[in-house]
Each structure stands twice: as structure tokens, then as C-alpha cells.
Image (spheres, grey):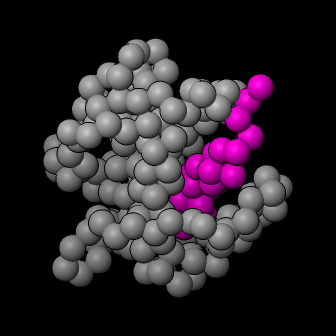
Amino acid sequence: MAATFMRPLLDQLTVSPVRLRALLTSLSESALRSAPSGVGFAPIEDAWHLRDIEAEGHFLRIRRILAEERPMLASIDGERLARERHYLEREVGTALDEFAQYREASVELLGPLVEEAWSRTAIFEDRVISLRELVKAMAEHDESHLAPLAARFSGARNLAGDARESVTVSHGVTSAGVATVSR
């Protein structure tokens, strides 16, 4: 029997690509490619970062935790990827589409798991981490990018909230307990 105790978290993960799309599709090209003053990614860099972390990090980590006994998981340097892959020069639509596709694949791997599977472990960044902890960290990571974007773009914030609310209602997830992590 699938572990229903993780359903709210999986629903939150499912909503992240919808929220990101709602935030970014309303932005001008200039806003999309402008980083906040001081520090941080431009919105298009956030989109590509979330895509790359999902495709090359989370999705592969989940697969390895499920297939191997306590695998050693690689960390990804997101800032290095942004520089090397020239995120600012790329198209946002591809990042949004691929983030959604990889996230859907990750959630499909997780959805049918029995409760015992969530306790499987790996070594990540010099510590033991369970699959449950990894998935919680995924949601926190999403929020660490989505919340600042929503705060920065007040007009887009309502779109992101509306997208989250409509999906939230259809999945029965409340917004309580959503973790926010500073980058």
C-alpha cells in the first residue's frame, strides 16, 4: 500500500513547476534576465537552476536511493552550472517545460512507495540522509527560489498564489507547513 502520509508533500512538489510558470511567464524579457541588486539569480537563472537540479540531482538521487543500498550521492554546484551553461542566454520556456517533466517523473517514482521505502538512506554531503529527508529538502529548495521570486514581482505574486491555490484545492493540500529556506 502506498504511503499516504507523504501525499501532501508530493502535492507540494507537483505544484512547484506550476507556480514557477505562473511567476515567470508574466515577466518582460528585461525582468526575466535581471538579477536582484546585490546577490542572487535572475528569474531565468532560477528556472534553469530548478530544472538542472531536478534533472541531474533530485531525480537521479531518488532513483539511486531506491535501487542501491546507501549510495553516495553527488552534490551539484548550482552557481557553477549557471555560469558554465549561460542560463541568461537560454530560453525560459524550455526550462519551465523540462522542470515540469522531470518533476512529474520524480513524483511518479515516489507516489506508489510503501512507508518502509521512505526510510531508505544515502550518503549526501557527508551525512546520512533518508529518502523522506531528501524529499522534504526538495520542497524547501523549491520554496527558497519561489518565495523570493513572488516577493520580488508583486504583480506576478498574485498569479503564483492563484496557481498554487487552484492546484492546492484540487489536490487537497493546505499551505500550512510550507518551509522557507534562505539561499
In this picture, is 67 found above or below 18? Answer: above
Of all residues, the one furthest to the bottom in this rendering is 154
Q: Position of residue 60 (x, y in %)?
A: 41, 27
| Residue at 43%, 24% in the rendered image | 65
Q: Position of residue 102 (x, y in %)?
A: 52, 35
- Is 18 one of the magenta-colored residues? yes
Residue 101 seen in render: no
Q: What secondary structure characterizes most of the magenta part?
A: helix
Q: Nearer the viewer, residue 109 or 176?
A: 176
- Is 117 one of the magenta-colored residues? no
State the quadrant of the C terminus.
bottom left
Q: Is residue 31 left or right of residue 21?
A: left
Q: Nearer the viewer, residue 37 or 32?
A: 37
The part of the image, by quadrant, that contains residue 57 is top left
Q: Position of residue 108 (x, y in %)?
A: 64, 30
Q: Position of residue 143 (x, y in %)?
A: 48, 63
Residue 168 seen in render: yes
| Residue at 57%, 27% in the rendered image | 117
Q: Nearer the viewer, residue 107 or 49?
A: 107
In this picture, is 4 found above or below 22? Answer: above
Q: Which stretch is magenta?
A: 1-23
| Residue at 60%, 32% in the rendered image | 110
| Residue at 61%, 36% in the rendered image | 107
